[in-house]
Amino acid sequence: QVQLVESGGGSVQAGGSLRLSCASIYISRFVRMAWFRQSPGKEREGVALYSRRICSTFYADSVKGRFTVYQDYAKNTLYLHLQMNGLRPEDTAMYYCAADLSGSDTWSTWTGFQYWGQGTQVTVSS
């Protein structure tokens, strides 16, 4: 069973930084991976996307210039990180890692992800 494990959430003040990490033993097989977030009462939204096939990234307008998604290899494990700088109270949400094994959707779309992590909470205070 494919598992995605997120870590790195927490509470920070506005302007601060956090780095989220997503680990899975299947990362080398994923075509795309992404970070999504959801706040209470709001729909889930895509935040940052990484295409392993073409080594490209795609961001929601709301996080461009502040968030960076990248892949890293450490301690025999492949990770997908989300570096979040300049955090704002509106970034407060549960953040989820998602993965696509099929690659059937256009790479820069927020659809077509089959696997999801449990989420990690990010809280930004003003």
Image (tube, rainbow, N blue to C red):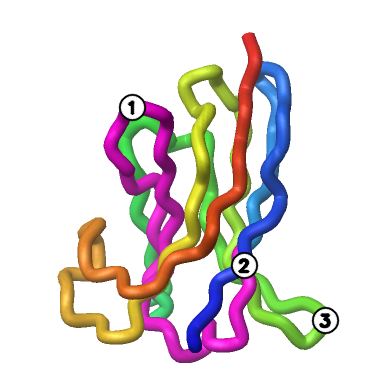
Contact? badges 3 and 2 (CB < 8 Å): no
Residue designated by label 3: 75
Rounded to the nearest angstrom, the CA distance separating label 3 from label 2 is 16 Å
Q: Mark 2 is on which residue type?
A: Val
Query: Mark 1 or mark 3: which comes first in sequence?
Result: 1
* Name of the residue lying farthest toward the top: 126
Tell me if residue 40 is in the magenta stretch.
yes
Residue designated by label 2: 5
86 and 37: which one is in front? 37
**Side of 107 relative to 65 (left or right):** left
Q: Position of residue 34 (x, y in %)?
A: 42, 61
* Residue in the image at 45% along x and 54% along y: 35
Q: Mark 3 is on which residue type?
A: Lys
* Quarter of the figure that contains the C terminus: top right
Q: Which one is in front in this view, the residue at disc 2 or the one at disc 1? A: 1
Tell me if residue 37 is in the magenta stretch.
yes
* Residue in the image at 24% along x and 61% along y: 108
Residue designated by label 1: 41
